[in-house]
């Protein structure tokens, strides 16, 4: 089957990373992930990310750069991650859709939440960057 891309945001603000707790589907509910979603056919991944963050969190965001790597999710999906920042004046993120809690994690708190197993290698990569910044 053709691979399909799921874009995830490493949303960074003041050296912290935003984690989002999924509310559905049942097998993923209660676990933490990077906000984002499926890229639509013909859509650029960066545009998908900005769209998803507006829908899910109610924020206007700007994509900074791709985090190297891609990670398999449930077939046929592959997770790709970009660092993202909030645009000036945008409201604070709110769990409007797909999530029931949000948490800003300091570098030392990155492993305090129960990430989806398949997200762990991506979060490790992001955490290294947070530590370096
Ligand atoms: N957004 C996101 N999805 C993830 C992550 N890890 C992971 O396994 N997934 C899975 C959950 C879903 O099966 C799929 C993404 O779907 P989604 O439900 O977030 O995407 P969407 O908003 O485009 O969904 P929909 O229109 O199909 O309802 O990838 C992650 O870190 N972020």
Image (tube, rainbow, N blue to C red):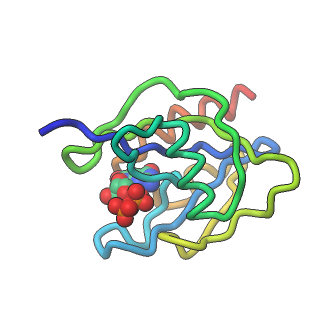
Label tally: 0
Can residue 116 be seen? no
Left or right for 51, reference 87: left
Q: Which residue extends farthest left?
A: 1
Screen quadrant of the C terminus: top right
Closer to us: 131 or 39 = 39
Query: Eyeballing the image, is 126 above or below 37?
Result: above
**The quarter of the displayed image where residue 56 is located:** bottom right
Quarter of the picture containing the N terminus is top left
Residue 90: x and y in percent read 81, 57
Quadrant in which ligand 1 is drawn: bottom left
Quarter of the image holding residue 9? top right
- Does residue 65 appear in the picture of this structure? yes
- Residue beneath the point at 47% across and 37% down: 45
Q: Is 89 left, or right, of 115 in this rendering?
A: right
Pick the front one: 35 or 14? 35
Asked if 1 appears above or below 28 in the picture, the reply is: above
The picture places residue 96, in percent across and down from the top left corner, at 59, 73
The residue that appears at 50% across and 52% down in the rendered structure is 36
Residue at (67% x, 48% y) in the render: 17
- Residue 93 position, x and y percent, is 70, 63
Residue farthest along the right direction in this orientation: 89
């Amino acid at each position: 089957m053709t691979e399909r891309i799921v874009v995830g945001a490493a949303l960074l603000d003041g050296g912290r990373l935003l984690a989002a707790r999924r509310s559905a589907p049942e097998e993923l509910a209660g676990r933490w992930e990077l906000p984002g979603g499926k890229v639509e056919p013909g859509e650029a991944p960066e545009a998908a990310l900005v769209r998803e963050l507006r829908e899910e969190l109610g924020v206007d965001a700007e994509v900074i750069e791709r985090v190297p790597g891609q990670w398999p999710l449930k077939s046929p999906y592959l997770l790709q991650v970009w660092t993202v920042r909030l645009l000036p004046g945008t409201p604070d993120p709110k769990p409007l859709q797909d999530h029931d809690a949000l948490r800003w994690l300091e570098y030392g708190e990155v492993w305090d939440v129960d990430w989806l197993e398949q997200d762990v290698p991506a979060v490790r990569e992001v955490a290294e960057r947070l530590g370096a910044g």
